[in-house]
Amino acid sequence: MNQTGARGCFITFEGIDGAGKSSQIAAVVAFLEARGLKVDQTREPGGSALGEKLRELLLHEPMHLETEAMLMFAARREHLAVRIKPALEAGSWVVSDRFTDATYAYQVGGRGLDAAKFAALEQWVHPGFQPDLTLLFDLPPAVAAARVANTGAAPDRFEREQRDFFERVREAYLRRARAAPERIRVVVADRPPEEIRAEIEAIVVERFFR
Ligand code: TYD
């Protein structure tokens, strides 16, 4: 954290598909802006012009699982270079819908790829750099799947995965939270949105403004 105003803070949101991150991201951005902060809201995969093109491929184009993994990191490399780092250095806060924890959850936990390879990619793409705070939305995959189905939108490559995939993604996220409890805060996500919003504001205040 930096309260001198020299550098902004980086907050990420994580969780399985259908966890309900989107409305809470908008709320936290509004909360920070109301405190007079400049906030850049972004997402992964995506967040840069090239990254958004890679997102289209990642969500809809069939590909080898390792291609998927490396494209996630390629999109992230670009996102860091053209958006996240410049914004933080200019004193803006950055709020991202997903970052590297999603790769460990989906590609390592869900897809079953070797974590050691990702440690190497992570070390290459963002050595020594982590979010200042990560809010992990946790809920049973059955509840999340019902929410995704209710949107009526055509499911992407990830949303079409079966329940056991999301069980593994959820467990991988929770393992990461246990390994980094200071950074990753678990938010129970099958609760009324107002309760979740109040809890998140309390976490942000405790972490950055006290
Ligand atoms: P998301 O933006 O949450 O999807 P939506 O627009 O449907 O709310 O995330 C897109 C998908 O990409 C999501 O299913 C998780 C997946 N993903 C990974 O598998 N690995 C990653 O590293 C990232 C950032 C996302």
Image (spheres, grey):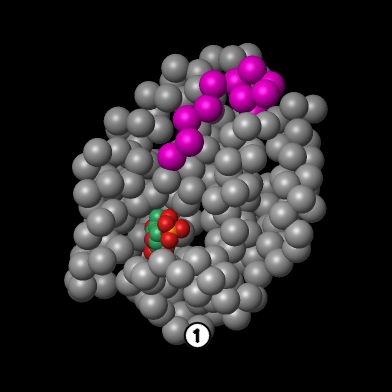
Measuring 35% from the left and 36% from the top, which residue is drawn there? 80
| Label 1 SS | helix
Amino acid beneath label 1? Asp
The span picked out in magenta is 32-42
Q: Is residue 14 above or below residue 205?
A: below
> Is residue 108 visible in this depiction of the protein?
no
Q: Which residue is mark 1?
A: 164
Q: Nearer the viewer, residue 71 or 143?
A: 143
Position of the C terminus by quadrant: top right
In the rendered image, residue 39, in percent from the top left (x then y), is placed at 53, 27
Q: Quadrant of the N terminus?
A: top right
Extreme-front residue of the structure: 152
Indicate yes or no whether the magenta region holds residue 36.
yes
Q: Quadrant of residue 125?
A: top left
For mark 1, does the 10 Å Cα neighbourhood hold few (<14), some (14 to 19), or many (20 or more) residues? Answer: few
Q: Nearer the viewer, residue 48 or 66?
A: 48
What residue is drawn where x is 39% and y is 29%? 85
Q: Residue at x 44, y 17 (%)?
A: 90
Number of numbered tags placed on the structure image = 1
Q: Is residue 109 left or right of residue 45?
A: right
Percent across and percent down for residue 29 are 59, 34
- Compared to residue 202, the image places residue 208 above or below, namely above
Quadrant of the displayed image that contains ligand 1: bottom left
Residue 148 in percent (x, y) is at: 51, 70
Position of 34 with respect to 129 (left or right) is right
Query: Residue 17's x, y, as percent?
Result: 50, 66
